[in-house]
Amino acid sequence: MPAGPPGPPGPPGAVGLLLRHPDGSSFRFDPGALCLELLTTGGPGPLAYFEMLHAPADLVRWAAECRLPDGLGLAVGEDEVAAARVLRDALWRLAEGHVHALPPGPEDLAVVNEAAAHLPLTARLNGTGGREWVTGSTGTGLLSTVARDAIDLFTGAYAHRVRTCAAHDCRLLFVDTSRPGKRRWCSMERCGNRHKVRAHRARLTTTDE
């Protein structure tokens, strides 16, 4: 299951989102793609338990914590928050269906394609040679950027590497961009470590018998 809303940014050099579970635990999770980062904010059905996109400030906060560069200066309306939830839920169904080689639902495809049809966020070089966002960035532009990222992911070179965490009680999705392509866990801090602990206990039990 998703771990809940992102927490504060990590120290310099930290990779991924810091997710906080309702049980009080936290761990860092890098899904490898912007569109999959949006899935950490909640989802359809039972995933609504983890909902964090309630107001414009919530979407602005997620945008500041995701893999997009800083300084977005995003302006978001209530209708764009609702659209973000619709897009996220469609992406959940499309991504899980993709993992299991199921045909995409027409309604979900329509949601993603409609979002992608809008103008995305735009960056430019400033006078010092640095990167900055064009003023007037909106929630609609953010969602277009997310939707276009999803289209690139599901049709690109790593489409076959989109996976669900191997833990039986975790639905977090990631794209394995590692060279060997053997990533199994959402995070070694959480599910990977739990697997190691269970395997160690199993070995001890076998030894004692």
Image (cartoon, rainbow, N blue to C red):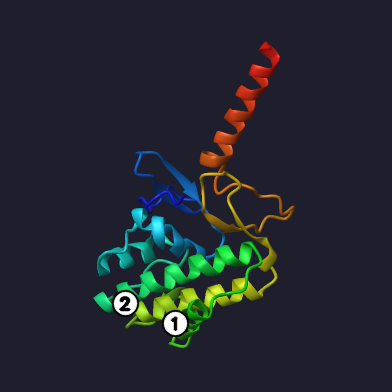
Residue identifier under label 2: 80
Q: Position of residue 1 (x, y in %)?
A: 46, 49
Q: Hey, what amino acid is under mark 1?
A: Ala
Left or right? Give the position of 10 relative to 36.
left
Residue 115, numbered circle: 1
Q: Position of residue 197 (x, y in %)?
A: 58, 29
Q: Position of residue 26 (x, y in %)?
A: 41, 42
Q: Secondary structure under badge 2?
A: helix
Q: Secondary structure under badge 1?
A: helix
| Residue at 51%, 63% in the rendered image | 36
Q: Hey, what amino acid is under mark 2?
A: Glu
Whichever of callouts 2 and 1 sits on the residue coming sooner in the sequence is 2
| Residue at 36%, 58% in the rendered image | 48
Above or below residue 164? Residue 140 is: below
| Residue at 44%, 87% in the rendered image | 119
Residue 35, numbered circle: none
Q: Residue extending furthest right?
A: 180
Q: CA distance from mark 2 to mark 1?
A: 11 Å
Q: Residues within 10 Å of mark 2 (few under 14, many from 20)?
A: many
Residue 125 visible at all? no
> Splitting the image into 4 quarters, where does residue 174 fall?
bottom right
